[in-house]
Amino acid sequence: MLTELQQKIIELKRNKNALILAHYYQTTEIREIADHVCDSFEMARLAQAAEQKVMVICGVHFMAESAKILNPGKTVLLPVTDAGCPMADMIIPEDVIALRERYPDAAVVCYVNSSAAVKAVSDICCTSSSAEKIVRSLEENQIIFIPDRNLGMYISSKIPDKEFIYHEGWCPVHDEITVDDVLQARSTYPNAKLLVHPECRSDVLGHADFIGSTSEIIAYALNTECYDFIIGTEIGVVEHLEGLAPDKKFYPLTSDFVCNDMKKTTLNDVLNSLESGIHEMVLSDDEVNAAKRSLERMVEAGNR
């Protein structure tokens, strides 16, 4: 049952003609008031198609930027302005330009976990669910994959006929997971299948029963006949799955699998932002136009 505060937000959302998009890593109380709970690709697709006047992005900074770039005529609110992404902060446009100069024949594939400025100097964006499809669609044989080295290495293992050049970026939450964590979880839950996100290190991926994006992990867990799963991504996915499939068992790979930035958004933050319109994502026309093509190409390729 929704709380009084949650009901107030939902009523205000209707009165303001607003759409609330929440990432899977958000807290349960935030996911409960969202119109859609989604991964980065689905959030981008929904933002691009949104007809509502206002979008509230319950996620992190680059997600609100992407929503504004894909649908610049809408008001985009990010309830907590300092909800960022450490991976996105690991690369700047000058890094990309230097890689382009060194590898002039390469296509720059930019993970969506990046700033608008970095997207602006990239050829095409991708998400973890669309990366393989997007790289395969490119004519170039050399791929500069930024900023996540772990995701890039995973995709390169699927497409060995292309040469990958990596930037040294990573997700601190996923990258800290070790094989020892995996072996401990396997020992504790010996009958459970291990589902792991490709932002993890390759040695961790080597122990997985299934590797996939957040949405792919959820779909696999819901649709397979197995009833016990170790979830190798942020703990919000465990909570989300427990709500969708209460007859199954879901265990976090470690109790430390928490993205603190994703947990910053509270119901009061959402209410305050909706009520007053504060924390609007503002980008100049030049910023929008520079970054728009790489994101649009991502959505187009992912929809094919």
Image (tube, grey):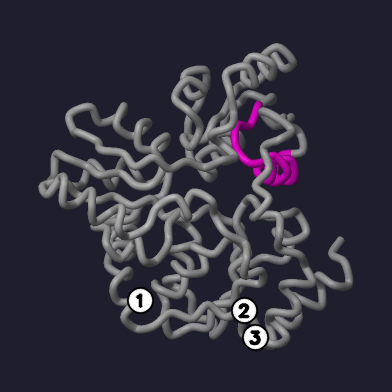
From the image, tell me which residue sits under label 1: 288
Nearest the camera: 187 or 291?
A: 291
Per the rendering, the mark at residue 37 is none
Callouts 1 and 2 close, C-beta under 8 Å: no
**x and y percent of residue 282 in the render?**
49, 81
Q: Residue at x 39, y 66 (%)?
A: 116
- Measured from the top left, where is residue 161 in percent x and y? 17, 29
Give residue 300's quadrant in the image. bottom left
Indicate which disc, 3 or 1, sits on the residue closer to the N terminus: 3
Circle 2 sits on which residue?
A: 279
Alpha-carbon distance for marks 3 and 1?
21 Å
Residue 3 percent across, percent down from the top left = 87, 67
The answer to whether 47 is drawn above or below residue 91 in the figure is below
Q: CA distance from mark 1 to mark 2?
A: 18 Å
The residue lying at 23 percent from left, 52 percent from top is 98
Q: Earlier in the sequence, mark 1 or mark 2?
A: 2
Asked if the residue under mark 3 is in contact with the one under mark 2, i.e. CB atoms within 8 Å, the reply is: no
Q: Nearer the viewer, residue 92 or 285?
A: 92
Which image quarter holds the C terminus? bottom left
Residue 251's x, y, as percent?
72, 29
> Which residue occupies 66% across, 28% down?
253
What main secondary structure does the magenta stretch of the protein show? Answer: helix
Tag 3 residue: 277
Q: Which residues are magenta?
A: 230-245
The answer to whether residue 140 is left or right of residue 259 is left
Number of numbered callouts drawn: 3
Per the image, label 2 sits on a secondary structure element best described as loop
Q: Residues within 10 Å of mark 2 (few under 14, many from 20)?
A: some
Q: Amino acid at mark 2?
A: His
Q: Is residue 302 shown above or below 63? A: above
Work out how far the residue at label 2 is from the one at label 3, CA to CA, in angstroms. 7 Å
User: What amino acid does circle 3 point to?
Assistant: Gly
